[in-house]
Every structure is written in structure tokens, then in C-alpha cells.
Amino acid sequence: MKKIRLKKLNDKVTKGGVLPLLGVSLIILLLTVAVYFVAHYVANSYTDENRFSNWNYLYTEKAGSVPDGELRIYNAQNPIVSDGNKSNIYFTKTLEPSDKASNFVLITDFAPVKIRLNGKEIYNNQFDTAEYVGNCYNAVTLEPSTQERQLEVMLKLPFSVRFETYLNPPGDPTFTYMPGFTIGLILMGLGLLAAIVFGILSAVKKRLFRSVIVSGLLCYVGLALALYMLPEVTYTFNTPKWLSITALPVHLTFMAVLLCLNGLFKESRKTVIAILVASVISAIALLVAFNPLTVKIAILLMCLLTTAAAVFVSHTAMVQLDRRIQYAAPIFVMCVFCTMIMVLAAIFMITRQRILYIYNVTISSIVIMCVLEYIYIRHFRQEKQNSDVRLQSTKYSKSVEGISQFIRHMLDCRDKSRFYDTAVREILDLIVKYHPDNTDIRYCVAVKNGDAYTEVVNNGIEGCRYDLIEQNGRKNDKECLFAGTYFEYILKNNDQVGAVFHFENIKDGMDVFFISMIEAAYCGLVTTYEDIFTDGTHRDINVIFAELAENTEIDNGCSVDHLINIRNNSRELCLRIGIEEERAERISIASELHDLGKIAVPKDIIHKEGRLSEEERVIINSHTEFGYTILSAYDDDPMLATAAVIARYHHERYDGTGNNGLKGEEIPVEARVVTVCDVYDALISERTYKKPWSKEDAMRYLKDNEGKIFDPAICEQFLAFIGEEENGTKAVTAQ
């Protein structure tokens, strides 16, 4: 089982388009690292001019004692060298005479501090009472002196040796300026302002609530940064518990970011609960820490839990890549980026690079929030478009019944002399049903004999250039042409132009649904035209519909082999599950019409590369009802009646979560059979939105979804049949 999962993961990364996205995540990571190193450098540049260097130091066994050994030198060229497990250190420096007062500032790693001047204690931050403190900032005012003075600093080392000293101008020593703290306050202000603006817009537009969440997250990041930097700018809050209080928000920042990323997925409640539980465990661990060791363990636990949460959300995002979900790729990139950043942040924190850690968290969070806001705004705009599309889709769904009637009336037209009048009348009826304002459409029809055109229908068109229409069709390799307020049909007989239709003065524009309706009508018109004019004999209606299904499949960019394979496989599968031969044959023939409803789905959606919006997904899923509407008009024919059932229910799921909510054996058996055959052949076939899967991966997918999508008994029989086919004992392929 473990090997199978590893193989699936390897195939996903190498063959599923994940590798390029991982590369994008890495590039963003490198750019972010560069940005926060630059930010760190800029922040340091503000304080370098006041930096106080050239100290002597030595580690000591006992806190507060003055060492007897030879002191070492600490400056920019000579960093502090570790000395085993000694937990105390002594620093000393001779101060030059000065006629000005100054503030001596010392930044530590939450270390208890004692400062003496000429042997006299002038500052003590819980040096004799605590193992660690809640502040990093320590400051004391040095008065002017005409003589040299000896400055001594004694530190306990609860976490690491951090010894940054500055000699600042005189002022209130309880607080100092730090760029990071100011940036946090600015981010808080920007986030609060943005939340107010988006809150007002949400009250009006009622669709920008997610932007309010991002604004709130920005405000939270600013608050976390300001709190985290507070121990660096004041010693007012120096209780040991203050370390946990200030560190907790920034540690939970990525958890909040992960919740926002995860919120873009559906069915993500379990992940939300897992992230919240991990956050609570992390918070409790840090808040109850009572000594340096437990603080280190709590921080390590937080880093591990956050990294695990990031990996889990990244895996969820990877699953979304298999589906045509909009924005799945950028969401996956951000989830992987978050995982990489968390690993890097953990390294910084474990190595006690606190400043690099905070810049890492802040800038990375801002990057993710920018992407989230981009997705939310795009989604908001898409929703505005979808609201219009939804209205059009509702109106268009009603037009599908008109398409069904159009096809039926055209197939009933057996008289060549009445064909053109009937076609024009039915097309006009379709247009008026869709756009009632189209009451003044002008049109003409001409039949081509040799090189000449003979007009057979004309309503208000003078001097129509049929030869130019033919040239335009040849140039664009299309027989159904649209431009502005008119459209044209070119009907062919044995690959030669036989007739040209021209309709103009179309009002209200040509949206994708109108064009799709006209293309569907054209597809039915071509099939009828070939039936009447090709050989003079009328074909069986089942044959005509089979040809219509083939034309629809080709028009959708698929191979006719898909239909043939489904027909052959469904026949064999029917026989294997005990269906009598006559019915199995009828089901197999009817299976070719399972996607006939796509004749009425806008081609822009079918041919769209990449992910579908939710509204587009709803529309393309409607092809099952479209197919049923068209085919159910012929329920007096046993084969077409079976085809109507298959068309309507072949996207039902065995667990009841399909289009119509049918569950288990409530789904007609013919639909359950075709579902398995259709999904398998679709997986191993190339589509505009995906590459073909291997047969092994497709079979594994079927196996994994037994009882979910597929009838387990039928699926088992199909897998056995395909296994025999692979082994050469049985072969069913397109002829």
C-alpha cells in the first residue's frame, strides 16, 4: 500500500504538471528570501551608526562573578565563541571621557542582565531572581564624565548569546525606536483601514467579505509584528510570561494564513478542525512553558505542527489539481510556498535568528495575502459575470427544448422542396424564443449548382454575395460563421458546398449561449441535410442520431473512437453482469448518445483550457439534462428512450452525491454501466484540459472510487475485463 501511494505521488509530481508549479514556488521563495534579507539590511543600517563595539568577554560558571582568566575580544571581526555548556557570560569595556550624557542600550535574547559602572550596580533586570525575562531591550542613562570609567555587563544565557550594544542620544531610556515595531504599527493601520473600506463595500456589494478577511489578516500580521518587536523596544513589560504572550501571535500567523488558503477549497472542514486543534496545542504549549527548556520545546513543537499543517494543506491543494477547479494552480503554489517558508522559518527560530524569523514570517505572509486578495478580487469579478451568466443560462436551458423540437421537425421534413422553408422557419422560432425582441430578422438562402448560386428564399436581402460567404468559410475552416449582428450557415454535400444560409439584423448581441444554440441548430441541420440530399434514401432515425453524436464529439475536440470504445466496452460489461444479449446490444448502441447534450453547451466552456469557474462547471454538468430533453422527445423509440435515460443519469454517483442525487441501485443499471466505461476511456484519452492517463492509473482511479462514484460489482467486472484485455486474453478496441 505504501509503495502504491509513493508511486501515485511520484506520478503526480512528474506527470501531473506539479513539477513546474513546485519550481514557481521555489522561485517565489528565493525572491522572498532576497527581499527580507534586504529589509533586514536596511533595518540594521538605521542603527549601525550608534553601534557600540569592542568589548572584552569571558564565560563564567557562577552568575554575577568576575572571571579570573584572560578576557577575549568581541567586535565585528571577532564574533563571540561558544564555550561548552556554561550559562553565564561577563562583558567589560572602558568608556572614554565624555561631556555629554547618553543612553547605553543592550539587546539580549531574553537574558536576565546586571550592569555595573566602576563597580557600582546601575541596572538590574531580574538577574538574581529569574531564569529568563520577557524583554530583550535594556537601557540605562550614562551621565557625562571627565574620567575613564569601567562598564561591566553580566548576562545569564537562557537561550543564546545575543549581545548588541548601542550608545544613543540622551532621552527616556524606557523606550527606543526600532523599524520593525513601526512597520508593525503601519501594517495594523493599513489593515484596519482596508477592513473598514471593504466592510462598507461588502455591505453594499455583498460579495467582498473575503477581502475583509484578508484586511483583517493584514491587521493581525501587523499586530503580531508589533507585539513581537515590543520586547526589542522597551523594558516595561519584563515578566518572563511576556515572552510567550508576544511570541504567540507571530507563531500562529502561518496557521491563520493556512486557514485562509484552505478556505478556498470545498469540503475542507476536517482540515480546518485539524489546523485549529494544532493551533490550540501550540498555544497551550507555549503559554504553560515555565523555563528555558520548556520554551524551546514549545517553540519546536509549534514549528513542527505548523509545518505539518502546511504540508497537509499542500496535499489538499494537489488533489484539487486533478479537478477543473479555478485558481487551483496559484493556491497550490502558495501552499507549497508556505510549507517551504515554514521550514526556513523553523531553521531561523531553532538557530535563534529571531529578527530573520520575524522578517521571514511578515514578508511571506504579505506575499500570500497579496495572492489571496488577487484571487478574491478575480473571484468577485467572476461572480458578477456569473450572475449575468446564471440568468442567461436559465433562459438558455429553456431554449434547449426548442433545439429538441427543431431537430425533430427537421428530421420529420422529408420533402426537399420544403426543406429550406422549414429550416428558416424553425431557426427564426429559436431566435425569437431566446431574444423576443428579434422581430425584424432578414434572411436569404441559396442553393449552389456548379459555380452558380440560385436563391430559393429571400426576406429583405438585396445582392447577397454567397461566393464571399463561401470564401470566408474556406478561409476560417468553418461552416457556421458569426460576425456582429449576423450569422451564416454553409451546408455541404460530399465535401462540396450545397447551400448557404444568411441571417442578419440580430439584436441584443450574440452571447456564448446564443452562439451555442445556433451551432446546435446547425449540427441538427447538417445531419438532416445529409439524410435528405446525400443519396436520396432516408436513413433510420437511430443512425441519424448516431451521426449527430459523432458530429458533436468531433466538434467538442474529441475522437469518435471514444464513442466506439464505450459502445464495445458497455456491451461486453452488460453481458458480464448478466444482462440479456438483446438489451445489452440496445444499451451499447444507446451509450454512443450519452454526451449528446453537449451539443447545447457553449463551445467556449467545453474547449476552455485550464480550470472552470463554479458557474461554468454547473453549465457543463447541465449537458445531462440537455441530452435527456433532446432524446426524450423520441421516447416511442426503444433505443432512443434508453439513450435518454443514459444521457440523464450517467453522471450520477453511487454514493448519492451526483447531479440528481440518486444513490446505489436507484440509478438505472444502463447508466451505471456507461458511467464506468465513459470515465475509464475519458481518463486514458487526451483532452484540452488534461493529458491522457496511463491505463494503470485509470484502473487505480476506478478501484479507489468503488462505492463512491461507481457500482462496486460493475466496477469489479469492468476491471477484470480490462485486465484480461491487457493480458491479451480479450481485446475490445475501436475498429
Image: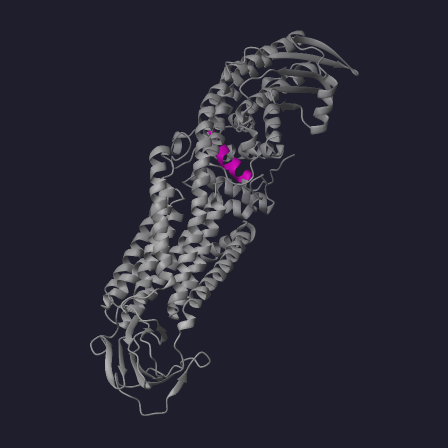
* Picture coordinates of residue 441, whole percent (x, y): 59, 12
In this rendered view, identify the residue nearer to me: 171 or 569: 171
Does the magenta stretch mainly form a helix, a strand or a loop?
helix
Answer left or right for 482 relative to 260. right
- Give the residues drawn in magenta, as a range: 670-682
Magenta-drawn stretch contains 292: no
Classify the position of the C terminus by image quarter: top right
Classify the position of the N terminus by image quarter: bottom left
Report which quarter residue 90 is drawn in.
bottom left
* Picture coordinates of residue 226, whole percent (x, y): 33, 59
In this rendered view, identify the residue nearer to me: 533 or 218: 218
Magenta-drawn stretch contains 679: yes
Res 113 seen here: yes
At a point 36% along the width and 41% down the height, the residue shown is 197
At a point 61% along the width and 10% down the height, the residue shown is 422
Answer left or right for 466 relative to 645. right
Answer left or right for 123 relative to 531. left
* Picture coordinates of residue 648, whole percent (x, y): 46, 27
